[in-house]
Amino acid sequence: MAQFKSEFLHTLHGRGFIHQGTDLEGLDDLMRRTPIAAYIGFDATATSLHAGSLIQIMMLTHLQRCGHKPIVLMGGGTTKVGDPTGKDTARQLLTDDDIATNIAGIQSIFNKFITFGHKPSDAILLNNADWLDHLNYMNFLRDYGRFFSVNRMLTFDSVKLRLEREQPLSFLEFNYMILQAFDFAYLAQNFECRLQMGGSDQWGNVVNGIDLGRRLGLPQLYGLSSPLLETSSGMKMGKTASGAIWLNPDKLSAFDYWQFWRNTSDADVARFLKLYTFLPLEEIEKLGALQGAEINDAKKVLADEATKWIHSEAALDQIHRDASSLFTKGTANALGAVETIVLTEQDFLQGEIPLIHLLQKLSLTSSNSDGRRLIRSRAVRIDDTLIEDEMFKVHKDMLLREKTLVISSGKKNFKGVKLSDN
RNA sequence: GGAGGGGUGGCCGAGCGGUCAAAGGCAACAGACUGUAAAUCUGUCGACGUACGUCUACGAAGGUUCGAAUCCUUCUCCCUCCA
């Protein structure tokens, strides 16, 4: 790819954000000449985004830092339809209340990265329910429906794959791509939005929007997709065995979030530093060049940088203390960041709770058998003491004395337990 | 419309009347090694019970049998060939 002249594309390209784009040269030229508005759509299917969406958030943040205007589009309307991309079955339909709750949760993350407001480069947050909900069916069909070729729609992967497998595809879902295309056109008409970005799985939808814009005679629209991110071991970004890496602090503790980044494989460190931090490339290059055990320093920087945006810079101290205590010294008494659950009287039966139940309560295991297996394989410790008895019961007195017990499963999973005050 | 093949645990894939909670591989989890990495080696890997065990599972529903993932019937979905 040629050298980009606009600050934005230059930055994105240098950091590995670009998978493909429509007329990148034209876009480069446009963005060099004038600030533009660009959007990314987000589904409102959960109360929080997870690490897999972080790359889109970073793109919007870079956009703003380069003087352009980010539009965060919440899919309040399209979520009611459900994107068939990559799925074999229709998604469960969400209620309006669910969606409103989800939007509020997701919005809180964006506030940490970009500035919203009324100045030219301030970001705006829109909900496509605001226009999709009030579409008039007849008018919509006549004004926009005529621009969509069903023949062509059937060739898009999202639809084609479903049909090829003879899996049901409802008319509702079939409309998803039309609505997303309409979104782009709507944003172009009402907010002078010229660019839609998204993961490469959204490519088809993005291109549809651009086509619609052309047919409507709008100014040239552009699309830009980011690579679908996997770790070097082929795992989808943001998912781990113990669950998704949620961005919202109430869904995942700062400590666990930091640990996720701290545990990055060597092979991914440099790539992740470019994508998930704002550190200058020269600095990343230095960190990426570290060899052997020194790479751990780079991982710490990655974890710090990634964590401080989502959580707070202030939380880092506590995390460092806890981590160093848990991993090097052993016992941890200064448990500030580790997720801790509070037990009440009801959790105890005659003053005790079986360890295998406690492990489940802490989400360290998924079943009693699972817990038993874990104990049998010598992986469970309470305050550094190896527990070998599957029947071990945690007595209330242990908590009264120790205040907070650290239960560990394996070498990296720690959870705290304490007794409620009353 | 006609002929044939097939749907097995998170995925791939054996099994084709009992010894099948189901080979093998991948993924995952844990242990050892190490750098909270990778690779490697070892163990575990449906649920419930301390355990002999019990329950639920091989597309769905029925049936045959002392006994079925395995046989029969119907339904359903996928694939291949012919028209």
Image: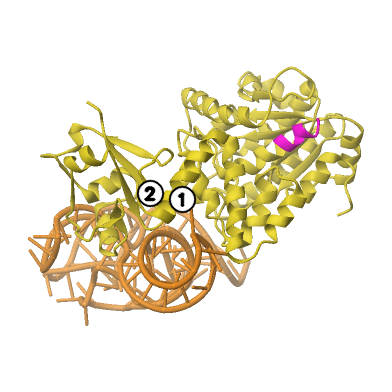
Q: In this view, does B6 lie to the left or right of A348?
A: right
Magenta segment includes A288:
no
Identify whether A171 is placed above or below A235: above
**Which residue is painted at 68% across and 47% down in the image?**
A275
Callout 1 environment at 10 Å: few (<14), some (14 to 19), or many (20+)? Answer: few
State the residue position of label 2.
A414
Q: Residue A419 carries which label?
A: none
Judged from the image, the secondary structure of the residue bearing numbered disc 2 is strand
Chain bearing mark 2: A
The percent coordinates of residue A354 (x first, y second) are 19, 48
Q: How far across and down, in percent of the image, does residue A321 sit? A: 46, 44
Rendered image quadrant of residue A217:
top right
Which chain is tinted orange? Answer: B
Q: Is residue A79 left or right of residue A356?
A: right
Relative to A309, is A394 above or below? below
Chain letter behind tag 1: A
- Earlier residue among tags 1 and 2: 1
> For chain A, what colour was chosen?
yellow
SS majority, magenta: helix
Q: Is mark 1 on a helix, strand or loop?
A: helix
Instruction: Identify which amino acid the numbered label 2 is placed on.
Output: Phe
Which residue range is magenta in the image?
A61-67
Q: Which residue corresponds to mark 1?
A: A324
Q: What residue type is labelled 1?
A: Ser
Residue at the (61%, 60%) spot, across then down: A295
Residue A216 seen in this snapshot: yes
